[in-house]
Image (tube, rainbow, N blue to C red):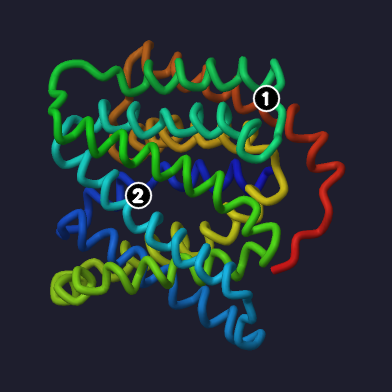
């Protein structure tokens, strides 16, 4: 659970990287996937060629396509509406996944987790404070990004438990990288000038992060993962204040505090699951 907290806080640095790289959103997605897939595949293949059943391959390929679609939809929403509106729309996903988990995965949604989820969502609304600037296209893509994120977690959790988080992260990211390879090819000339930012975004915040995320999803209740997901936009405020001098106001920091409080409650909720956790194969 600590690793998931660290991961979501690290994801909050992504806007800083995006601002510093002169690539289109599609090119950023493609480079992120390509640089994330290569090290994961290298580690996976060093352990031998993965052996999966036919149905498992189909599920992994489907998740890879969904992953590529999610990031393209999210970045498209960011480029066609305000960042605040896009964030709030996308972060409806944790509410959806926690609400649907009892029906899809048979996981109960306990009162404490539901309360923490509501507090976290309220915190993100305070942080982002969406106002004017909504567009039909931006809202549609934001909702599509939320729906695809929800589907990824609910469909991916049982697969991660079956084949292991390393196999799922490596194969899913590789499928998504293949689907977006045309954008990666066009990005190479400009990408050379931003190689270290893209390396952090791809190798660490996509490749390594994908493994850590699926390992956490496989072990923790979906409701706990959902609440801790809100640490990403909250931490982005902290990183922006530290590196960009964007200090925010009292309302913004109140939202951050709400998210932190919700995270603490989710941590208490997830501790029982961790104590009963069985080792997850890689």
* Image spot of residue 89 (x, y percent): 33, 29
Q: Can residue 192 be seen in this view?
A: no
Residue 280 appears in which quarter of the rendering? bottom right
* Image spot of residue 256 (x, y percent): 47, 22
Q: Is residue 30 visible?
A: yes
Which of the pair 73/198 is nearer the observer? 73
* Image spot of residue 83 (x, y percent): 24, 32
- Against 263, residue 191 (above or below) is below
Give me the residue at 40% from left, 56% from top. 67
Which of the pair 270/242 is nearer the observer? 270
Residue 274 appears in which quarter of the rendering? top right
- Against 7, residue 234 (above or below) is above
> In the image, 41: left or right of 27?
right
In the picture, the quarter occupied by the N terminus is top right
Question: Circle 2 — which element?
Answer: helix
Give me the residue at 16% from left, 60% from top. 23
Which of the labelled discs sits on residue 109, or is there none? 1
> In the image, 198: left or right of 6?
left
Question: Circle 1 — which element?
Answer: loop
* Image spot of residue 108 (x, y percent): 71, 28
Which of the pair 243/90 is nearer the observer? 90
> In the image, 187: left or right of 256?
left
Q: Could you tell which of marks 2 and 1 lies nearer the N-terminus? A: 2
Tell me if mark 2 has few (under 14), some (14-19) or many (20+) residues whose alpha carbon lies within 10 angstroms of its own.
many
> In the image, 175: left or right of 264?
left
């Amino acid at each position: 659970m600590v690793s998931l907290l660290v991961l979501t806080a690290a994801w909050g640095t992504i806007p800083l990287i995006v601002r510093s790289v002169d690539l289109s959103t599609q090119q950023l997605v493609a480079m992120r996937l390509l640089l994330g897939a290569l090290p994961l595949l290298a580690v996976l293949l060093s352990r031998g060629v993965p052996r999966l059943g036919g149905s498992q391959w189909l599920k992994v390929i489907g998740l890879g396509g969904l992953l590529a679609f999610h990031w393209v939809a999210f970045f498209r929403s960011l480029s066609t509406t305000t960042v605040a509106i896009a964030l709030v729309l996308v972060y409806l996903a944790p509410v959806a996944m926690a609400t649907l988990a009892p029906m899809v995965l048979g996981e109960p949604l306990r009162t404490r987790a539901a309360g923490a989820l509501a507090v976290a969502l309220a915190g993100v609304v305070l942080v982002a404070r969406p106002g004017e600037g909504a567009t039909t296209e931006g809202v549609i893509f934001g909702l599509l990004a939320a729906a695809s994120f929800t589907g990824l977690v609910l469909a991916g959790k049982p697969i991660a438990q079956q084949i292991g988080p390393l196999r799922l992260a490596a194969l899913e990211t590789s499928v998504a990288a293949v689907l977006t390879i045309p954008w990666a090819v066009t990005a190479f000339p400009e990408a050379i000038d931003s190689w270290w930012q893209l390396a952090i975004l791809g190798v660490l915040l996509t490749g390594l992060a994908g493994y850590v995320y699926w390992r956490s999803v496989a072990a923790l209740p979906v409701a706990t993962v959902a609440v801790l997901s809100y640490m990403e936009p909250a931490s982005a405020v902290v990183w922006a204040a530290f590196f960009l001098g964007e200090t925010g106001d009292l309302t913004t920091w109140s939202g951050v505090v709400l998210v932190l409080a919700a995270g603490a409650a989710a941590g208490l909720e997830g501790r029982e699951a961790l104590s009963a956790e069985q080792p997850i194969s890689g």
